[in-house]
Image (cartoon, coloured by chain):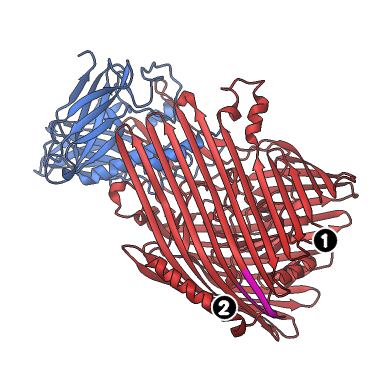
Amino acid sequence: MNRFLFFLLFLVGVFLSANGETLLQTDTIRKELREIRVSDNQRRALDATFPGNDRLYEKDFSRTPAFMGESDIMQTIRQLSGIQSVSEGNSGLYVRGGSAGQNLFLLDGMELLNPSHLMGIFSVFNPTTTGSVSVYKGQAPVDLQGRLSSTVAVYSKEPTADNQGFDVNLGTMTTTMSWIKRLCNGKLDITTGIRKSYLEAIGAVLSPFLSDEQNYFKTNSYRFYDFNGKATYHVDSTTNLTFSWYTGNDKFRYSDPSMEYLATNEWGNDAMTLLYSHQRRPGSTFESSLAYHSTYSDFNGDIISYTMQALSSYKEIQWKNQWERTWGNHRFHAGVSLADQQTMPLDMLFNYNSDTLKQYHRYENGLATLYAGDYFTARSGTLNGYAGVRFTGNLCVGNNSSILLNLSPVFSLSYLLAHEQSLKLSVSLNDQQVHLAALGSVPLPNDIWVPVTKELPSETASQLTIGYMKDWGSGNLSIEMYGKKLDHQLIFNLLTDNEDVNDFEDRFFHGKGLAYGVDFSVEANRGPFTGQLSYSYSRSIRSYSGILSGRWFNDKYDRPHDLNVTLSYTPNKTWDFAANWVYASGSNMNLPAGRWWLMGQLMNDYETFNGFRLPNYHRLDVSANWHLKTKRFKSSVINFSITNLYNRANAYFAYFKVYQDRNRYNLDIRTKQVSLFPILPSISWRFSFN
Amino acid sequence: MKHLIYLLTVICLVACSSPVELEQQSYEPQVVVDGFIESGGYATLYLTWSSPFLTSYDSASIRRSFITSASVFLSNSKGETEALTLFRSNNFFPPYVYKSTEMKGEAGETYSITIRYDGKIITATTTIPASPSVGILSMNAVSDTSGNLKLSVLPRSSTETWLFIQVKSALAKEQYHPILTPVVKLKPEEGLHTIPIHRVAESNVHHLDTIKRFYTSWPRYEYSLDDVITLKYGTVDFDSYQLLKSIFADQAIQSNPFAINSVGIRSNINGGIGRWTGIGLAPTLVYDGAN
């Protein structure tokens, strides 16, 4: 039924789009906007319509110290105020009190649901193909909405006179390569990149020196790759056809024969989009796209007498049309999209001896979205703003079918004051039509996507943001305050027994959240020095009726203080240096408050949730780029980086162990932390050629 | 969702660690009741103080956690009442136990306890359900020396019954203690239930003493084929079933830092924490490896 409706709507849409250019004539041409953004980089905070909107460019990525020879887009994003700086072993992005599943990641318009490689160490975005990134912290134009906390829109480079050719980065763990070219007399633009890890090669290198049992990389393996790109065919001066794609995969194999243990874990994303865009005349544009994206994880484990297989997947096909038109002081855009979501949160087979447990859950949803928004200016350009509304109808198909409706308005104003200052205000009600259920206390690639159903309604957030910005030519300052109320939040209840529930949806706690804070950011350039300081004070609390009878508690990633300082120094054309120091409050842990004896064993007493805070996190990373003089290459740069320069043992998580001596009546509970990264030096070589 | 807990355990196996100081949140110690009454047996009750989680016990402070001066009264639905007597018990920890000397548990009866201590009045009530049917204990050999023990038992009536299973090993010189997953629901429509009797290995406990433990280096869950294993099992009421289930579900994830207990642990003690459990016992079953 759902598929039939989707097909029907698709046909109607194709018909409409065929006639669309005579019905609605608009413009925007994202490319044009991006070019404006690039040229206006220095005034980005002042001119943005939305508070909490940051734009990053290639020079920002290159300033971030590389990790194991590879710069990472997400690391640069984490240097922004309002976004938590800490990232070790954690694929999640935490924006203004939100959670990991409340961020929309778009690569050239394609959604990527699982945006990390190597358990969160690298993001899926290829740094050599990325041209710019636009980040919205909770409030965005209606066409970029869809998650409560943020939208991260990553745009690949367009071929220009300077950047065409090959770009290669040979890192310590990965090699990344991109190719950017304008072909066929300017009719075809191609930007493509591939990245591949070679951790398995480390095992081969160590083989002569270690036995197979001692060689971790011989008995265990980790590999990942990704391949993305964009090909634009310029049909004529007003019409473009663009095909974008992404495919990426991580595979991790761990074995320990002494424990009779073998596990493989695999996850990845696939996405593609075909985009038709037509500019009837300046100021009037129509775009139509057909997009597919999916994510999956597949865990297989074999330990002693247990075997387990757990699959999870999410697939979405979307057809979207958007019209944009400029007249006078208004730039109006409107769109309609239809999507078919197929979600399989869990397909699991668990064997113990002769016992088998099988679980299989599958859902299908049909989404129809209508949106309209208007950028406007008034008072001779000193006041600009945006007003928009997004309507979503979600048809949940199945035994308990239902239609759920959401209306999400957003309003934003920016008032330009004298002396290069501006005030901003934004208010919004946002929703998201899919949930991310964390299986453990830290985000994992195996966390499962769960659809919206009647029992698990869409998450919503209302947010108010006010901000003040100032530019002074060689720098800028930004202060923003926000408050956010979150509803229909979910926590997956790991301890639910199968016998206690009828449906998969019964395995969740339902609750609400509050987040508020102040983000402060200052950036200054003086001669060869560039410095940036971002500080956020934020609080994020939650309340779930099934936990502590609804009492409020700190969110796991409630970190009141988060400071990020970046300094770069370019003394000449041969060398440049960068350093990044991060200081943040520790995250929270759910340890018991008390302990007691029962049946001769030590038991836990839980009085709070997330009641323990891990030690504060801090880390200094440094890097140096050596620009070699070369005639063979267009550019040749050797990067030296040291991650965690002073070898701080930061806690990834903590656990406890009981030490007891019943003869002497001694008992001690000792907490231990697990740290991922010691001091890590690395070297990489990046070069480009035609 | 034990299988998901298993997945999380697997993931944390690759980690390494170092000591860390965490700040103990404020915690008000509570009176802990660990009590039970079995059909045909005397009431047994251990009283202790709970402690803040991240504090160390030494011999002096651990002794202070034993409550030995409480007045404990047992009453039943017939109106009978008895004051429990404190005994020293060297075979169990904690080593002081309050016991009845006259009143014994009867199936179908309701039992209440009232504890007066330090100005507090602590109460709890439980019932003893009818005993389960007699099961069969058998061993499936996994190797020449070890095997998996299992209990086969039929549901007794047309309604659901809830079992609580304890075990002791002669080779390990154990007292009765719960098996790894000691609470089981029996559904009449499912016929014969086969319950694995997993040997308990406290993975998060590091023993500093020199007591030799027979099963220290044995495969997880398995027993020696030469052991003499005694199984004590009985029915509990639904409240006790849920309470015990919450306790042992928490135990299962204690050593896994990725797992979260979002629901806490249940208690049926008013004015304190712990359990007061009535158990309708079946005859004990013995696996004798020598025979």
Residue B239 in the image, given as x and y percentages of width and height? 24, 46
Q: Residues within 10 Å of mark 2 (few under 14, many from 20)?
A: few
- The answer to whether residue A71 is left or right of residue A525 is left
Magenta region, residue range: A276-287
The disc at residue A511 is: none
Q: How far is disc 2 from disc 1 in space, using C-alphas?
A: 35 Å
Colour-to-chain, blue? B
Instruction: Tell me which residue sits at (40%, 20%) in the image.
Output: B216
Q: Which residue is mark 2?
A: A18
Residue at the extreme front of the image, as rendered? A184
Element under disc 2: helix
Compared to residue B78, the image places residue A418 above or below, namely below
**Residue B166 picture quarter:** top left
Q: Which residue is mark 1?
A: A161
Compared to residue A425, the image places residue A227 above or below, namely above
Residue B224 in the image, given as x and y percentages of width and height? 31, 18
Task: Give the amino acid type for the residue marked by disc 2 in the picture.
Answer: Ala
Task: Give the amino acid type for the residue marked by disc 1 in the picture.
Answer: Ala
Compared to residue A588, the image places residue A276 above or below, namely below
Q: Chain of mark 2?
A: A
